[in-house]
Amino acid sequence: MVAAERGEQIATFDLETVRRFADLAVFGLSAAREEIDALNVYPVPDGDTGTNMYLTVEAAREALREHLASVPAGEAELRPALGAYARGALLGARGNSGVILSQLVGALLRRMGQGRPEDRSAVVMAEGFAQASEAAYAAVGTPVEGTILSVARAAAETAAEAARDPEAHLGDVLHAAADAAREALARTPDQMPLLREAGVVDAGGRGLCVILDAAETAVTGHRPVGAPTPVGTKAIPQPLPTGDLTEDGPAYEVMYLLDAEEAAIPGLRTRLQALGDSLVVVGGEGLWNVHVHVEDVGAAVEAGIEAGRPRRIRVTHFAEQVTRARDRRAVERRGRAVVAVVAGDGLAEIFTGAGAHVIHGGPGRRPSTGEILEAVLATGAEEVVILPNDPDSLGVAEVAAATAEEGGDVRVVVIPTKAQVQGIAAMAVHEPGRGFDADVVQMTGASRGARHGAVTVAVKQAITSAGPCEPGDVLGVLQGDFAVVGEDQFGVARDILQRLLAAGGELVTLVAGEDGDDLATRCAEWVESEHPGVDVLVYEGGQERYPLLLAVE
């Protein structure tokens, strides 16, 4: 579709477009994240792809705002702004989906920042899509089709075709890329049997479609035709946010959810427009998400009270953001530290007691690159070991480690622990007094020697590697894969233990989750009875969703 058929297009990718895109990406993923999380193909509620992608673009937007607030009014330039957004995405990335998204964003924006005045924006954007797709594939150890990678490649290939038209504008390229992404998303079940069996499309690909729709809307001002709207929501047309986050703009950002009838929203919009700028209200069916920049926080909240019932009110003072960014201080580093991601309060006590610095994580609240980086730097150590203890936090930890080492004053190694019990095994042999490399070798060996399993409960119907399951079925996990489907937690746990002990073992570690103390006790008694030569350690981990974690060393 050429520009003449779609109305006037923005011919350049400028700073205002970046601002609009940053806001629209956050709003789009905020509205869609529950839908994307629900595309989880596994029977336990570990799916947080939508949440991770939302938090990644939110962190990118905050980084952009901090950068713009630090630049004198009217002096902001495109290239540094793009760099700030890309770095924010990198540091804010959560989970594998967030890491891949940050790679896509970083590569795309690097190419956009290299554009020359004589370059056609459409061509630069198409080249950026191609570089983004290549970077994402390169960042994944074993690329799998039917994922966000496939969707990104389809968008890049179609963008390149569209850019060959000498009359194509930036909006035409984005329109073609967004359309191709949605078509590629629909094909993901054909490429991945697990998706087909679950009757869903790829969650990461769906999130990328939201991002591309936001980009097209930021450039053209029109919502893409065919872009899916999350069930139960509808967007109210608003002026696209353009407020400067500098000393000349409003001092506060106010966001809240609002329970209100649709008839009250036009009045709310009028009231808030008079108070500030960057107003966006999205929602429907009695629930709305309100965002505005104002000087008078109280008046913005009162407007919500008059319209309905505001909740989850969040206020951000832009000046404080800048102060926090400027207050980072260099420290003299010495010694060695371990940073561990933990999935429960009891696990936090276990790791802290062993001398580690802990970050709370787990399904639904996995840490960002920035959080792990901050924890690494906050140790004050010159040598740091990171234990991600979760396969979906491994990529984030590796990016954090690489970023920390860029400063040159700290050495960081990630031990690829994919389970909490592997992290416990690594901490058991940690010895700060020996050489760093020797300590890493010992910890890595101990973690790899811990054969691990878990017991959980299905919350939805699904096809697993152990066969079909129904809600309420007990699932046994062996080395990260579903191996048993049963009805009794103790019976399933005993089956997993038997399989782990079949290859021998000297020590069994049991970590009880919420309400899992009795299960752990029964398993310990069974091991002592059936394998009297094997030692048993029982911990209270307090982790959610998994009544029992177990390992054999």
Image (tube, rainbow, N blue to C red):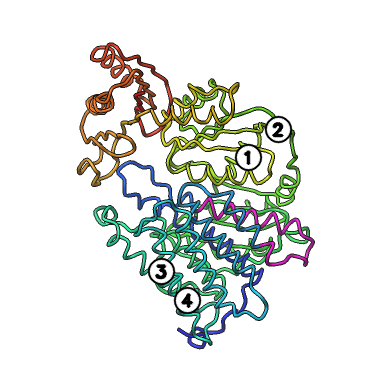
On whether residue 527 falls in the magenta region, the answer is: no
Q: Residues within 10 Å of mark 1 (few under 14, many from 20)?
A: some
Q: Residues within 10 Å of mark 3 (few under 14, many from 20)?
A: many
Q: Main secondary structure of the magenta part?
A: helix
Amino acid identity at mark 3: Ala
Q: What range of the chain is rendered magenta?
A: 54-81
Of pointers 1 and 4, the one earlier in the residue sequence:
4
Looking at the rendered structure, the secondary structure element under dot 1 is helix
Q: CA distance from mark 3 to mark 2?
A: 46 Å
Q: State the residue position of label 2.
A: 333
Of pointers 2 and 4, the one earlier in the residue sequence:
4
Q: Which mark is residue 315?
A: none
Looking at the rendered structure, the secondary structure element under dot 2 is loop
Residue closer to the observer: 4 or 342: 342
Residue 106 placed where, x, y %?
A: 57, 59
Contact, CB < 8 Å: mark 3 with mark 2? no
Of pointers 1 and 2, the one earlier in the residue sequence:
2
Amino acid identity at mark 4: Ala
Q: State the residue position of label 4.
A: 160
Amino acid identity at mark 2: Arg
Q: State the residue position of label 3.
A: 154
